[in-house]
Image: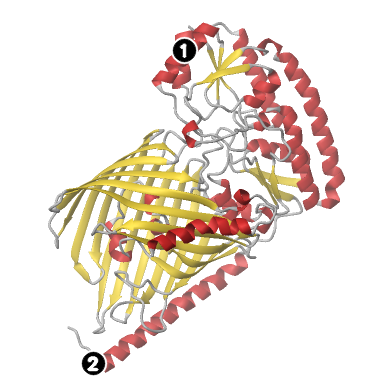
Amino acid sequence: MRRKFLFCCLLIPVALYGQTGPVSGSVMNPNISLIGDFRGMYTSELARKFEFMFNEAEVSFQSSIDPYARADVFFSWGRDSAGEYSSSVEEAYVTTLSLPMDIRLKAGRYRMTTGRLNTVHPHTLPFSDLPAANRGFFGEEGLIDEGVSLSWLIPNPLDFYQEIVVEASDVPAESPFFMRPASGRYLYLAHLKNFIELDENTTVELGLTGLSGPNEDLRTSTIGGIDFTLKWKPLRFNRYRSLTWQSEVFLGHYGEADGGSVRSLGCYSFLTYQLAVQWFMTGRFDYTNLPRSADVVERGYSATLGWYATEFQKIGLSGKLVTGNAVADRSEIALRWIFVIGAHGAHAY
Amino acid sequence: MHTDSPAAHSQANHRDIIMTSKFVKFLYCLLVMVAPLRSAAAGDKLIVVSSIPTLKSIVELVGRDKVESFAIATGYQNPHFVDPKPSFIMKLSKADGFVTSGLDLEIGWASSLIQSSRNAKIQPGGDGYVDASRGVPLLQVPSSIDRAQGDIHIYGNPHYWLDPLRGKQIAQNIFETLAKLSPENRDYFAANLAAFDKEIDTRTAAWEKALEPLKGQPVIAYHNEWPYLEERFKFVVVDFLEPKPGIPPTPSQLVKVISEVKSKNIQIIISSPYFTTEAAELVSRQTGARLVVLASSVEAFDGVNTYYDMFDYNVRVLLEALNSPPTN
């Protein structure tokens, strides 16, 4: 099955080449890249404390389809906790390029716009694991679902960037807060993004998110979220110094089968400071409850030192202490080596 | 606590449906409320966004008072590493035209901004999309490429605007798009283009004459971004402080460069405003070679406001360096 999958992936550029007529096939091929994520891990609570793993290989195909839309497809080969590898379509979506009224439509399987962190691929993060709140509220891989997303640039008298995103999706087959029912209910999301430049070096982003959808008890779960990001990067020497402070808070409301409900809280805050052109230091605090138990508390404290060799390779060393009232305290050390070969992707801000 | 009676379940489901319905209504109301705020298109000028201030300056020289021009990068910013801030999307969403230097110089940021702009006119292939490199004779086009060579550009060195005569082709490309976007002003743009070409020819002759003393002189550069300036004014870049393009200077590279500077009696080290000067100053202290931070773009320094100013500035500081005593 996996061989067939790989074979199909390799055929995609060939198939597109065949459609191009006299134009060079390589020109019309989509941008293709492969991202590798290799790790060495120490976990104090496990019997096998040291472990090496090739955590994930992600292959992306990205290109305009025609003047009206583009396609982005990401396949992932990931390793599960048993050490087995399996392939999956991480994301595959079509995005319009030129709808009127500053509207953009996205359809397919994609990372849902639940604030800041969920929308980015984990290998781009300055730390090696997702915050406990994101895992606790959205799942180990974040909230990824099939659906449609409509975004609109809101005109405003001050002319700052304001975007509203509304999404309707099929409901993830399984996530801590939501579960796809046998019939007729969907997951709805709205996100309001406000972006302001304080000066040429400093920006602030403030976002509000609301999600509502069915859960395992066939009731409704709702999540409200606030995200805040402050970035500072001097334009003149923008490769040498920068600072990012990012925080998100999630408030969950889980409707239970008996008509009762559980309110839960999750949050994280991290600060990344660029020490030199290739060196970055990140500190992060996590806090989360479980969706169905506000009494369960998990806290995490982590620090990561990153060496970013080029745009195509980085190595990070993380140390993390996890405390909580439901599990024993544990410490983790992770060495993560990320590399990219293939097309140079565009960066997100 | 759990009461699974059918009545309780039905009541709970009813509340859920009402909640979801309210959520959807709230979104609808929000969209309706903000819809009237949508601003009208700005004036009768063409709005042209450029990736870098050099291109913005040429847009202004060709479009004059028929264009409103804006640049995404600043002149003192490394054009390869620009953060695609969402605020630029607002500018691009209203733009009639977008001018890019092309050749993948802005590969890390321009494409994501253009795609997010929701503006068909400025997408590649659109009426307002200008690849300023079109028709420009390029240097250092690699015959083979591998990332082990560092930050190599597959289409050739992208800093072509640093040759004033190649600037005429950039202006021609911009003219063609402005004339397409605003055909009623074609003659006006054509007259401005002719004036630009004439001014460039006159000034280039003067710049070449002024830099006669630099002809054939060996020079060290921080980064490989000067081949077009080098070709026009006939100096020779013999080595770089970066061991490979995009890789920060290493001690072994600096030792090698210091040796070269001494053995070849090199007088000048050139750099750009967005690179720190520690490595260049170290070489300068060890050898006496003068460090010159050139304007690699319009608006790199105060007073460098136009394409002409950029060459005036560079010619002046190079001459000052040639005429000043060694630094050690």
**Residue A180 placement, left or right of A103:** left
Where A347 falls versus B244 (above or below)?
below
Q: Is residue B87 above or below residue A222?
A: above
Q: Quadrant of residue A222?
A: bottom left
Q: Residue at x 84, y 48 (%)?
A: B185
Q: Earlier in the sequence, mark 1 or mark 2?
A: 2
Graded by Cα atoms within 10 Å as few (under 14), some (14 to 19) or many (20 or more), the crowding at tag 1 reads: many
Look at the numbered disc 1 and give the secondary structure of its residue.
Answer: helix
Q: Which of these two is toward me, A151 or B140? A: B140
Residue A270 lies, with reference to residue A179, above or below; the image says: above
Task: Indicate the amino acid at tag 2.
Answer: Ser
Which x, y percent locates residue B25?
48, 78
Count of residue discs: 2
Kind of element beneath mark 2: loop
Q: Amino acid at mark 1?
A: Ile
x and y percentages locating residue B145 in the rendered image: 54, 36
Give percent across and percent down for residue B292. 56, 18
Crowding at mark 2 (Cα within 10 Å: few <14, some 14-19, many 20+): few
Which one is closest to the eye, mark 1 or mark 2? Answer: 1
Q: Residue B5 — which label?
A: 2
CA separation, marks 1 and 2?
86 Å
Q: Which residue is mark 1?
A: B258
